[in-house]
Image (tube, coloured by chain):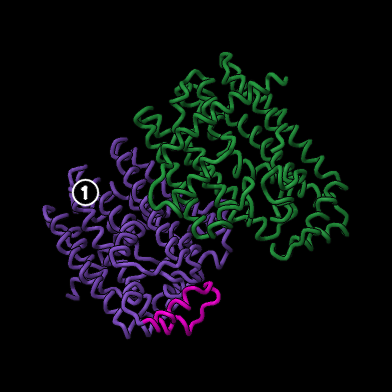
Chain colours: A purple, B green
Amino acid sequence: MSDMSGDFDAVLDGYSRAARDALAGYVSAREPSRYLYEPMRRCTLGPGKSLRPALCLAACEAFGGSRGDAMASAVGVELLHAAFLIHDDIEDGSERRRGRPALHIELGTAIALNTGDALAVLAQRPLLDNVDRLGSRMARTVLTEFQVAMERTVEGQAVELGWRHDQVVDLTPPDYLDMILHKTCAYTTILPLRVGALIGSWGDADLEAIARFGFALGAAFQIRDDVLDLVSSDTSYGKNALGDIWEGKRTLALIHLMRTVSDEDRQTVMEFFTRPSVARSGGGARRIRVLMDSYGSVDFACDYGSRMAAEAVAAFDEAFGDCPPSPAFVFLRGVVPFMIERVA
Amino acid sequence: MSDMSGDFDAVLDGYSRAARDALAGYVSAREPSRYLYEPMRRCTLGPGKSLRPALCLAACEAFGGSRGDAMASAVGVELLHAAFLIHDDIEDGSERRRGRPALHIELGTAIALNTGDALAVLAQRPLLDNVDRLGSRMARTVLTEFQVAMERTVEGQAVELGWRHDQVVDLTPPDYLDMILHKTCAYTTILPLRVGALIGSWGDADLEAIARFGFALGAAFQIRDDVLDLVSSDTSYGKNALGDIWEGKRTLALIHLMRTVSDEDRQTVMEFFTRPSVARSGGGARRIRVLMDSYGSVDFACDYGSRMAAEAVAAFDEAFGDCPPSPAFVFLRGVVPFMIERVA
């Protein structure tokens, strides 16, 4: 098992480095530097797992394609992700990212917002370059895959922001799943897997099966992310401690809590969330965290995440079952346990 | 002359309606509605001159193309413009837009930011649809034109935001022109004119000449916009009174003022700009406005705008001189005086 995960890490590292090298060519140092290209470089070339590019490259290789054929698309996914993170942090009022102050804390909202725009714009460049390597037809198909994923992402974001704006709390796990299907899975897992498989199989892969795997994988990933936010200390995780509670995120744990809590404890929770975020106290966030333990809400989220991971394992066989054995195939099969076991 | 401008208005109105109808097909009412598609519709289907689509459609027709061939691109430009306006208003802290509260004032920064992202994403859709009507090669060329213009826009925005961030005031008119070439002209005039001409001429038009016309026209437009901000009252113009001064925008008038002002008056100006924007007073903004009159800074900007308009007239002949007479040709020739004479 530890050998397996050693292999997994090495393969991930290989994908990560290759994608980062390709990405560096798109965010070269140039003017205007200080308030545009330098922050763009910091947000894309700094430490990170490059999981999304790895999914794209591995899916391409698993279907017999060459890594280089999917590289530009992998870079596009990563640039898009960097753009979304910056805008997310502004929208959520998050103060830290990857162990440092968030970009809008460092440079102000205006410059951070524009840097996010610039990364989203730049994400289209490698997709245009696809024409030269993959031809017009495939390049257009890939552009359309990106288009659909980006539209889903902003829709999911609008749903989540709407919940917070209207202080909606009577939500169900299916509401949550539908929201993260749009907001997270569409671009984090489904997009890179579909695009990689599409390129690698030259259109032959069963993209619906790939999307089902991507959804289960992405859901397991997001639920794990939410749980890590609840159980990690600030230093190991690189974000605000209990940041999701502070920001009022409708996570599975919070949704479970609101569905099971006593009237008295519900008052405590509502009292916290109806305050403007600047008036929320650390003590209030910690009280909600304690309530989540009392009501088994964290365990509920963990169990839910495990069920999604089990679904992902089953969906993997349908999506990639016909692929011949390869390091890429083994890597993709290993992504599910990696998602669930990761601690940061 | 009044007949001419009556014709001009009618032609503009025709382009405007046609573009708006086509645009409506892209922002249909759907879910999530309240915090996404409804605001997107309000920001794109409300009253407005649709000048950018008109430039695109007219350039296409002037070169003998059919209006429908450029329609999707015209819609793309307008969607992009709507996206930029929302993000600009957040970045500038502008409170009003088109006579109503800016979107981030109405719905909060988070939802407004995401709505802007969604409009920028949606702007790519009609460009992908170009493939069916114009073929892969032309569609790719148009996508690349958009790509270049969007990259220039975020660069120009970064330069301007950097000036404000660092309180840079020792600027020259060429600094200003270079900034608006990127920030405004690239997507407001150069992009729609080039794309329209490209499609209408099937690649034969002299795009460099078109770009020179677009730059002069866009500069005249932006300078007029800046002057209107200084001379208009809130109600007629639909933005904050003296909004650019409040926001610390480095306009030509401000740049002229800082280059000619006495040391004592310079203190007054700097004292205003070094305050955080929330601590700036209406009295301070009005004092700067009075100084601009004393030092002839508004006249300087007006004269500069007139010179750019004269350049645009000369550049028009180079860009469109070989086109046969047509209503589109007459319309484009009339855009320069329209830009300079407009009062809103």
Q: Where is residue B261 in the image (x, y as percent from the top left)?
A: 85, 52
Image position of B69 with respect to B239: above or below: above
Q: Where is residue A82 in the image (x, y as percent from the top left)?
A: 43, 58
Chain of the residue that carries numbered disc 1 in the rendered image: A
Image position of B212 with respect to A286: above or below: above
Q: Name the residue under label 1.
A: A207
Q: Determine the main secondary structure of the stretch shown in magenta.
A: helix
Image position of A234 with respect to A223: above or below: below
The quadrant of the picture occupied by the C terminus of chain A is bottom left
**Amino acid beneath label 1:** Leu
The quadrant of the picture occupied by the N terminus of chain A is bottom left
Q: Residue at x 67, y 57 (%)?
A: B164
Q: Residue at x 43, y 47 (%)?
A: B121
Would residue A337 be found to the left or right of residue B322 on screen? left
Image position of A122 with respect to B325: above or below: below
Q: Does the magenta stretch include residue A164?
A: no
User: For residue A108, what is the image quadrant?
Assistant: bottom right
Is residue B151 at all visible to an observer of this figure? Answer: no
Q: Where is residue A169 in the image (x, y as percent from the top left)?
A: 39, 69
Q: Residue at x 74, y 36 (%)?
A: B305
Please report the bounds of the magenta region as a residue range: A263-288
